Image (cartoon, rainbow, N blue to C red):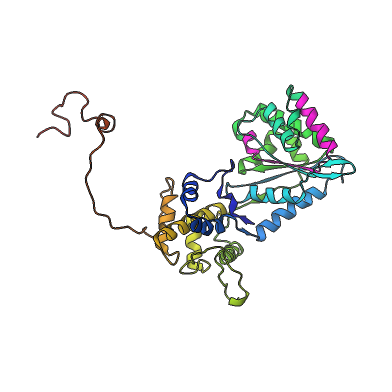
Amino acid sequence: MIDAKTLAGKDGLYPDDIAEILANADPEKRAVLMRIGRAVVDHYRYDQAMKWLDDLYREHGTAREGRAGLFYGQPGVGKSTILKRFASMRAGPFETAKGTVRPVVLVEVPSNPNEINLFDALLTALGCEHLCVGKAEERKRAVVEQVKAQHVHMIILDEFTHVIEDKTEKFQKKAVRHLKSMLSEGACQFVFAGTEELTSIHEVYGQIRRRDAGDFYLTPFNWADEADRDEWCAILASIAGEALEGEKEEDVEEGILAIPPSPPISGLKQAHKLHKATGGNISSLMKLLFRATAIAYDEGDEALVDGVFAEAFEFARRGSKDDNPFGLPRRKPRKPRLSELPEGFENELTGVRKGERRDRDSFSKR
């Protein structure tokens, strides 16, 4: 599943340039861009990930102990989007004869976690902020009680890599030991989600490996893999509303790009360029399409051509030295002009007035 709402970061905020574009956009431009911002496209990786989560969920109660699994991959491959979609389908809360029931609880692990804020994150996800009081052990007891009282089948700990990356091995073991005790009681299943560094949890705490239900590794699209390449092209075709080879035009659904690409982005050559520009990463792809559409709209372009994509790529390069797959960005003719810095800026920026002029100074007479 591509959910382009992941244009926003973990804090729910857009990258600075995208936030600025949306803030300054007129209603028509905003509508054009938010067609990208609200898009969802189902695909094979999404199906496989959802099946893995569903299988683990259904194992609840089938054994004396709970099971755990790692759900990991590079940033931007769609992990959090899939987890949110899965949780939204099952999470609740639902009011039943037994009381409030939350079959799935999605928890975002805080950065730089400690025992207190880790249990507070769990209690907040359980709708029990009022229980975020007392010492760590008291909070832990409150979590255990609420998991049982609300008949929780699965807890998903998103960004659990914070525990692995930001803390000492001693804290890692302590945090995982707390969660392991809930697994031992068979209270619920656990999903630890994060980046690839998450796999070290098996080395840090072997008890989790013993309860491992199998892990799911979500990868970017690999251009060298034929199946991945075909799926990548099919996704691009869906986004742009283009027909794939052998597909009838009348069977093609409308895409989300208000400004059509030229040439078609689902063709092998153009699809390869987009793959090079984004590393086969869905989040990067959607941001590139968003920026390219914004540039084309402002310039009055009738199509997303290579020059537009080249500009969008350069804007988000962020220090990358890779060649621009789309060639050189367009250069807009502009007449050069001279101006002066405001009074007082010379000292700070150039140092021209600092100290006495010496013969070796580059501004000295020769």
**Above or below for 245 versus 270:** below
Q: Position of residue 314 (x, y in %)?
A: 41, 52
Q: Does residue 174 show up?
A: yes
Q: Residue at x 57, y 73 (%)?
A: 243
Residue 146 rendering spot, x and y as whole percentages: 81, 34
Position of 172 with respect to 22 (left or right) is: right
Against 110, residue 286 (above or below) is: below
| Residue plotted at (54% across, 66% down) | 240
- Which image quarter holds the N terminus? bottom right
Q: Using the image as rendered, state which of residue 345 and residue 286 is in the foreground.
A: 345
| Residue at 68% in and 48% down | 84
Task: Depth check: give the residue in front, 226 or 254.
Answer: 254
- Residue 42, horizontal then vertical, whole percent: 66, 60
| Mark count | 0
The reply, left or right, for residue 97 in relation to residue 258 is right
Which stretch is magenta?
A: 138-164
Q: Is residue 360 left or right of residue 28?
A: left
The image position of residue 145, as x and y in percent, is 83, 32
Q: Nearer the viewer, residue 246 or 305?
A: 305
Residue 246 seen in render: no
Q: Quadrant of residue 212?
A: top right
Q: Quadrant of the C terminus?
A: top left
Taking the magenta stretch, the answer to whether it contains residue 162 is yes
- Residue farthest along the top direction in this orientation: 135
Q: Quadrant of residue 228?
A: bottom right
Furthest residue toward right:
97
Taking the spot 76% from the left edge, 37% from the top edge, the residue there is: 126
Residue at the front extreme of this rendering: 27
Residue 73 within the segment the image draws in magenta: no
- Vertical relation: 258 (above or below) 20: below
